[in-house]
Amino acid sequence: MRREIDRLQNELIAMNEPQPRKKLNKERERRPKRVSHTHHPAHRREDDTSKAANTFMDRMRLFRLKNDLQMLWDRRDEVSRAGK
């Protein structure tokens, strides 16, 4: 149980670490825009809907992680109280 609590805590910490800031338009290097002819999914530009969906999924995952962690802490407290 202790290992599981540690794993969940580490995952929470990793998710809450600040992400690198996106460069503003004026900070971007100026270079001519290239027209992309590739259809490979890794080379496609992300549209805003997928970004919004990803942040929503991250928030849901964070919420579930916090709940799981809280349940484990509560269970650990109950076990320690029962042991006394």
Image (spheres, grey):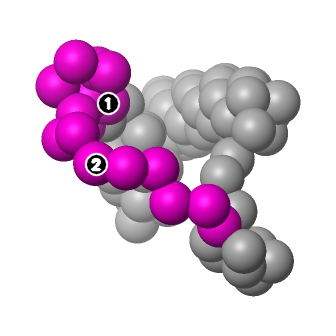
Label 2 secondary element: loop
> Does 33 appear in magenta?
yes
Q: Position of residue 7 (x, y in %)?
A: 42, 59
Mark number, residue 31: 2
Report, in whole angstroms, how far the alpha carbon at label 1 lies from the one at label 2: 17 Å
Name the amino acid type tagged 1: Lys
66 or 15, nearer to the observer: 15
Image: 26 above or below 34: above
**1 or 2: tag closer to the N-terminus:** 1
Q: Quadrant of residue 27?
A: top left
Name the amino acid type tagged 2: Arg
Mark yes or no: residue 17 visible. Answer: no
Q: Position of residue 61 (x, y in %)?
A: 68, 38
Relative placement, left or right, of 63 versus 12 is right
Q: Which residues are magenta?
A: 20-36
Chief secondary structure of the magenta span?
loop
List the residue tagged with mark 1. Answer: 22
